[in-house]
Image: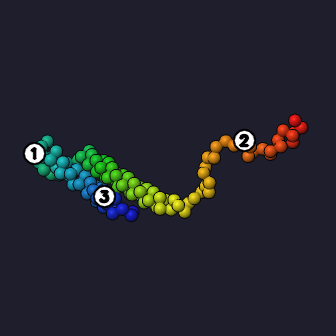
Amino acid sequence: MTNKKAKIIQIIAFVYLGLGFLGGIILGAIAGSFGNMFSDGSSSGGFSLPMMLVVWVTAFVQSAMLWGFAEIIEQTYRTAQNTAQNVQQQPQMNYYQQPFYQGYQPQSQYPQNYPQHYGQ
């Protein structure tokens, strides 16, 4: 990574993914405890797997979107750098010493004695 903003966004995405993983476990445990408490009146514990999976999937999707946004920023930055470098090198990269299109000039393609040369 060469762009600092993109690197910061990638770090945020990675931290968000880790927090989502831990948050899914914690919220799964809390939601499971509340579910048992309301069903039978005891708070003996439990675990809500659907709540954990929802938090995990949500955290993964959001962190993937952040990571992708950072990649778009990075690729845009690299493209701008390469374009600026190519513009600076353009006078050095003179591929054509003469203009590319010179027009149609049939006399230059055949010898001057073309009809006599072929027996006409």
Q: Position of residue 40 (x, y in %)?
A: 12, 43
Q: Is the C-beta separation of discs 3 and 1 under 8 Å?
A: no
At x 36%, y 55%, the residue is: 73
Relative placement, left or right, of 81 versus 95 is left
Which of the two marks, 1 or 2, is nearer to us in this view?
2
State the image quarter where residue 17 is shown: bottom left
Left or right: 94 in relation to 79: right
> Disc 3 residue type?
Ile
CA distance separating discs 2 and 3: 62 Å
- The answer to whether residue 82 of the structure is visible from this angle is no
Residue underneath mark 3: 9
Residue at point 34% right, 59% down? Answer: 6
Nearer to us in this view, 77 or 103: 103
**Mark seen at residue 108:** none
Can you say which quadrant of the picture contains the N terminus?
bottom left
* Tally of numbered tags: 3
SS at mark 3?
A: helix
Mark 1 or 2 closer to N-term?
Answer: 1
Q: Which quarter of the rendering shows the C terminus?
A: top right
Pick out the residue farthest to the top.
120
Question: Distance of mark 1 from mark 2, alpha carbons?
Answer: 100 Å
- Mark 2 lies on a secondary structure that is helix
Residue at which label 2 appears? 106
Given the image, on which type of amino acid does mark 2 rest? Pro
Q: Is residue 119 above or below residue 16?
A: above
Q: Which residue is under mark 1?
A: 41
